Amino acid sequence: MADIDMDLSIVILNYKSKRLVRNCIRAIKESVIKAEYEIIVVDNDSGDRIAEDLSQYAPDVRFLSSDHNLGMGGGNNIGIRAAAGKYVMIMNPDIFVFKDSIQRLYDFIAQNPDIGLAAPRLLNPDRSLQYTCYEWYGPLTPLYRRTFLGRLNFAARDIDRFLMKNFDHLSIKDVDWCQGSCFIVPKKVFDQVGLFDERFFMYFEDTDLCRRIWAGGYRVTYVGPIEVIHMHMKMSRGGLFQLFTNKLTRLHLASWMRYLWKHRSRETQPSKTNS
């Protein structure tokens, strides 16, 4: 591996999802990729014996593991640190790539050295759009999104602003931040701005990374013409009771508070260079 001039490292984080990992790897291997690439699977203490599975159907995949669950950011960081590629693609196991998705995204960022993160358009399995590029959170946006308050007119307007519903998602656009399900970053950008902040166990690790990429002088770009499928299950809104009973809701809001505290001294948010 050390003798190969590696262009791209694809990092897939597993947590009790080995069937999805298998399908994800199959789609990657069926892709047309001219770049020299490697696949790194990181197991986040799943206990699902994925290593045995990989040895049978994908022995060329690099397998790394953690002895405890480090969360989204911490688990992906294991793969990023081990990556030999000049570019690193973070890919959730529930991503399905089309044959040209990876090469096109690689070509796009390689041709634009001022871009620090590029993300494709994510689609539901029925090919409907997922809103995965965003403006910065307002002070109460996470609360609106996770509770019945989001049904109120003023809150709904804030959510629409946040989700960037007013632009053509088939276009290419600099955005404040992109969801961390699938994106590509030059390794040198990680070296400059740092990896995922592991204090965010789940949620806001992608928001925080994009903020640091902007602050580092790079752009964050949504590449609408390139698409992938994301087998994502949307969380439904609940009442205030959900704040105390739903673990994912509590994780989301806890990460939000951690994010606000981390960036409390910033007078302004990093801004896009174009609209």
Image: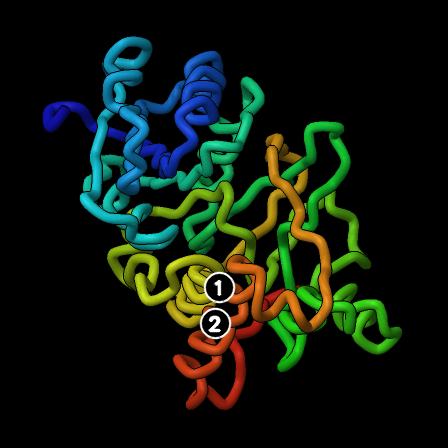
Whether residue 119 can be seen here: yes
User: Residue furthest toward the left?
Assistant: 2
Q: Position of residue 122 (x, y in %)?
A: 63, 39
Image height check: is 178 above or below 10? below
Image height check: is 21 above or below 92? above
Query: Of helix, strand and loop, which one carries label 2?
Result: helix
Image height check: is 22 above or below 179? above
Residue at (29%, 18%) from the top-left corner? 54
* Count of numbered marks: 2
Q: Nearer the viewer, residue 88 or 65?
A: 65
Image height check: is 33 above or below 226? above
Q: Which residue is mark 1?
A: 251
Q: Nearer the viewer, residue 141 or 161?
A: 141
Residue 100, numbered label? none
Q: Position of residue 187 (x, y in %)?
A: 29, 47
Looking at the image, do the residues carrying marks 1 and 2 touch, with CB atoms under 8 Å apart?
yes
Residue type, numbered disc 1: Leu
Q: Nearer the viewer, residue 261 or 263?
A: 261
Where residue 14 sits, quadrant-wise, is: top left
Where residue 156 sits, quadrant-wise, is: bottom right
* CA gap, disc 1 and disc 2: 5 Å
Q: Which residue is mark 2?
A: 254
Residue type, numbered disc 2: Ala
